[in-house]
Image: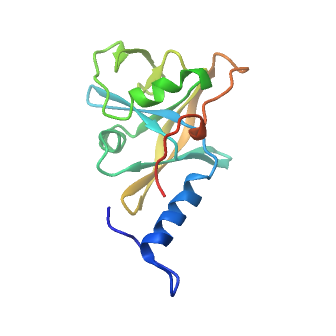
Amino acid sequence: MPLVGPFPPGVDPQEYDRLRRRVLWRMPSGIYLLGSVADGRSNLMTHNWAMQVSTAPKLMAVSVRTDAVSHDLIVRGRVFSLCFLKRQDRVLARSFTKPAQDDGPTLAGQPVRRGLTGAPILAASPAWLECEVRTQVPAGDHSIFVGEVVGCGVEDESAPLLRMEDTRMNYGG
């Protein structure tokens, strides 16, 4: 991956890039499965760039790499789900780092159900949100999708939720 500036004057760009990535990787974030659906195809992908951006209406923003299968599905389907994961289910985060094999009632071999929007929801998810896309904003090699929460559910409010630092994975920076 090529180095991306800007760089402060007088610093070694490679050293600074490594430092900047280490600092950005330290930002606390949850890790989720982002669901998408369009034209009969579904996907769940490991995702950590998500946040609530408005309370009235309830809006969520997710940032998705433009060359990802999920990006295309969200653009065409105009919906997404965000499935929370239990800390004990960290292995599931690794199961969805590549496009999931869609065989109807399962994705990547994991049972899913369809929400109000048709987006897949991991059956083992302790909580989830469903959103309809209201805005898409280009953001470098990603797009930010802002979606209004139109459905949600919770199965286990007491479950400790998975965070990026629980997985030894990193993304971004």
Q: Residue at x 55, y 58 (%)?
A: 22
Residue 116 visible in the shown view: no
Tag count in the figure? 0
Residue depicted at 39% across the width and 26% down the height: 95
Give the camera-side residue of 143 and 158.
158
Please give the name of the residue rendered at 47% of the width and 22% of the height, measured from the top-left corner: 121
Indicate how the structure is coloured in the image: rainbow
Please state the horizontal and vertical placement of residue 41, each as a whole percent of the image: 28, 27
In the image, 79 versus 5, the foreground residue is 5
Of residue 153 and residue 25, the one placed in the foreground of this image is: 25
The N terminus - image quarter: bottom left
Tell me if residue 6 comes above or below residue 129 in the rendering: below
Return the x and y of residue 170 as percentages of the image width and height.
49, 46
In this rendering, is residue 77 above or below 54? Answer: above
Where is residue 163 drawn, in percent x and y? 60, 36
- Percent across and percent down for residue 112 are 43, 16
Quarter where residue 77 is shown = top left
- Depth check, front residue: 15 or 5: 15
